Image: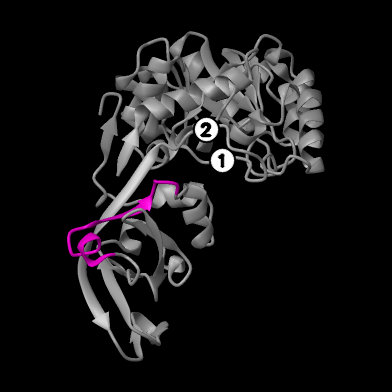
Amino acid sequence: MTIDLGALAGNWRALAALAPAAATGAAVKADGYGLGAVPVARALYGAGCRHFFVAHLSEALSLRPHLAADATVFVLHGIAPGTAGEFIAHGITPVLSSLRDIEAWASAARAAGRTLHAALQVDSGMNRMGLSTAEVDALVAAPERLAGIDLTVGMSHLACADTPEHPLNAEQRRRFIAVTGRIEALAGARLALANSAGILLGPDFHFALTRPGIALYGANPTPSRPSPVAPVIRLESDILQVREIDRPEVVGYGAAHEVTGPTRVATVAVGYADGYLRAAGNRGKVRVAGRLVPILGRVSMDLMTIDVTDIPPALSAPGMPVVLVGDGLAIEDVAQAMGTVPYEFLTRLGARFARTYLGGES
């Protein structure tokens, strides 16, 4: 796997330019969407990013030493019991999404004898994470719950931003404004609602901070519209074996593909153990010698088979490269053939793909 950190940084700048009135952060959870959180975050920091979002404290602890002190690392999953000390010791900022989180962080502030920074997440209609309406009511009724906490960010998350015309987008924005307006402690905080697709919804959704994720890594966040970003990864494997079939035969597990005429079948060193999902069998395509060729039969754990009948033998022999992503074969196309989304495809790419980085530190 080749990862173009220059393109990654360029994507961040392009997204930042779409929301010039807001600061632009970056979601680097799940090991930088499978590409390597440390090199990804370093490249983004070099481009100007100062707000980084991960899911787990463990991710933040791995990332924090590689970023300068002026970078803020937010943990979206908040504070697990007994972890407040690690947040404080390493300068990591929790996202508080419940009254329990608030109580734990306020208690930590009292024990530390100082004010602690945090982000506050409210539920604006996705019903996944964030303070519920009842919890907001309780917080408004007892604002002293936030004693010792400096809320630097108030945030929520859009459920349908990748469908621009969906009515829930406007409804979530309305609820977000209404709810955050009730919480006095958010008066001086940056408000953040837009993910990658949310940025493309326009200035009404940008507020003071955006949190792009998938678009940074080269995938179009709004499939119905032209992509604002450039490809970041190139994924290759190679041909292990080629066989000539000149009579009706079957290919692969379950006899899932039947060859009816003369066919050259190449076996490629990639499978679902590498994150190339089984569902791509008989649906997906790869590129050999610049041409798209179909996958034949099922993708197995370590191997898959492709049709190279129309590729010159010298260009489809054992050892020749097979492009899985790149050369016009977009992440979105590959994910669609697998019946999934670019998020899942990227984050499932396995450790057997050696990561090579261009245009930045690795």
Q: Tell me, yes or no, whether the two marked residues, 1 and 2, touch with CB atoms within 8 Å.
A: yes
- For label 1, the SS is loop
| Quarter residue 142 falls in | top right
- Name the residue located 56 percent from the left edge and 24 percent from the top edge: 15
Tell which circle, 1 or 2, labels the residue nearer the N-terminal end.
1
- Residue 354 x %, y %: 23, 45
| Quarter residue 154 falls in | top right
Residue 314: in magenta span: yes
Write down the region rendered in magenta.
312-328
**Which is nearer the eye, 107 or 246?**
246
Marking on residue 307? none
Marking on residue 229? 2
**Which is nearer the eye, 136 or 67?**
67
- For label 2, the SS is loop
Looking at the rendered structure, the kind of residue marked 2 is Val
Q: Which residue is mark 1?
A: 220
- Residue 252 x %, y %: 33, 80
